[in-house]
Amino acid sequence: MDERTGKILKCAACILTALYFGAAVLAVAGMAVLRSDRLQAPEQPIDFPHTVHVGQLGLACTYCHIHVEDSPEAGVPPLEICMGCHRSVAVDRPEVRKLIRSYEQKKPVEWIKVHDLPDFIYFSHKRHVRAEVDCSACHGDVAKMDRIKRVRPLRMGWCIGCHRALGASTDCATCHL
Ligand code: HEC
Ligand code: HEC
Ligand code: HEC
Ligand code: HEC
Ligand code: HEC
């Protein structure tokens, strides 16, 4: 191997190594972005559009999230509520057929939680609704979301920031069980 071929080979090896590491860095970064994206707006077992039900039909949140005013949990709606309309509405659509099938087989839909605080935290919807904190302050404008996504960090600093601003309690025991 003469000197020139040696140099070319070394150069090629160097470029390949650079490409290899470059690709690895991009792949890792890409996966991190994808993962955080999926965490914030996970694909649901039924592609339920708030855009249609809230944005177009104008249904109140409490039409479906029936416990949000009187319980700590807002909860996801039981399928009976959906069937009130979907016994006859849009029954030919694949996503609605999934819903009807689950209902008929008495299999609850396994919705993936978008907002999920650690278990050592106490949070109450009722208290916030009574204090007239709007759903959108914490969940954004769901009427415009094809798929629900998390728009707030749900970190302690965020909770306390608002509690300070609105004069709510910032005692540790308020939120820490
Ligand atoms: C027709 C019924 C219906 C109405 C009306 C409705 N929702 Fe929902 N909502 C659902 C269903 C079903 C889910 C679970 C699937 C999903 O996340 O998209 C859900 C999920 C959510 C979630 C995510 C829960 C989680 O996993 O963290 C939020 C936040 C939410 N709704 C807020 C609202 C708000 C705010 C309104 C009123 C502006 C509203 N919804 C009106 C049916 C409804
Ligand atoms: C008050 C009546 C009503 C209720 C209650 C209701 N829906 Fe709907 N839903 C509709 C109407 C109307 C449409 C739009 C149909 C169209 O595009 O023509 C729709 C559309 C949908 C679609 C989209 C269909 C598609 O692919 O275009 C899905 C999925 C759906 N509903 C699921 C649900 C689920 C799940 C619930 C219960 C949490 C629910 N709906 C409760 C009336 C209702
Ligand atoms: C002060 C902030 C805040 C407000 C206001 C608020 N939420 Fe939530 N919401 C949260 C947090 C935080 C969670 C996660 C709770 C958990 O993991 O225990 C959540 C969870 C949910 C869930 C998932 C089911 C559950 O109960 O965990 C739904 C549905 C929901 N909210 C709907 C609503 C609706 C509808 C309103 C308005 C009537 C509303 N939220 C107002 C912060 C808020
Ligand atoms: C947008 C403003 C806002 C945000 C964000 C917020 N809160 Fe609150 N919170 C309030 C207000 C206002 C009250 C009502 C105080 C009252 O009832 O006098 C309250 C009350 C509470 C209470 C009941 C307090 C009591 O005295 O019993 C708890 C528990 C609570 N919040 C937990 C949380 C947690 C946990 C978070 C974050 C995940 C959070 N809050 C985020 C505004 C907020
Ligand atoms: C308004 C609600 C609220 C109040 C008041 C509050 N916290 Fe928190 N805290 C949270 C939430 C929500 C988390 C979980 C999310 C996070 O880690 O940011 C948390 C997390 C923490 C963690 C991290 C725990 C872990 O394992 O990750 C510590 C430590 C903590 N809080 C200490 C305190 C102390 C000390 C006080 C009183 C000075 C306090 N908190 C008051 C809401 C609150």
Image (cartoon, grey):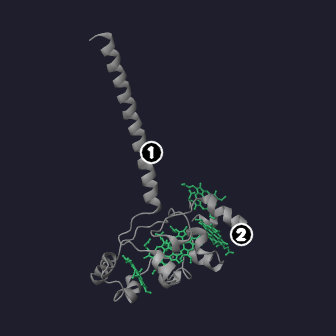
- Report which residue position mark 2 lands on: 166
Q: Which mark is residue 112?
A: none
Mark 1–mark 2 CB contact (< 8 Å): no
- Report which residue position mark 1 lands on: 29
Front-most of 61 and 75? 61
User: Residue at the top extreme?
Assistant: 2
Q: Percent from the top left, x then y, of residue 34?
A: 42, 53
Taking the spot 46% from the left edge, 66% from the top edge, the residue there is 114
Q: In this view, does 121 lie to the left or right of 45?
A: right
Upstream in the sequence, badge 1 or badge 2?
Answer: 1
Taking the spot 62% from the left edge, 61% from the top edge, the residue there is 158
Q: In which quarter of the image is ligand 3?
A: bottom right
| Residue at disc 2, CB closer than 8 Å to ligand 4 | yes
Give the residue type that dot 2 points to. Answer: Leu
Location of the N terminus by quadrant is: top left
The image quarter containing residue 97 is: bottom left
Location of the C terminus by quadrant is: bottom right
Badge 2: how crowded within 10 Å, few (<14), some, or many (20+)? few
Q: Look at the picture and state if 51 lies above or below 12.
A: below
Q: Percent from the top left, x then y, of residue 172?
A: 64, 62
Q: Distance between the residues labelled 1 and 2?
A: 38 Å
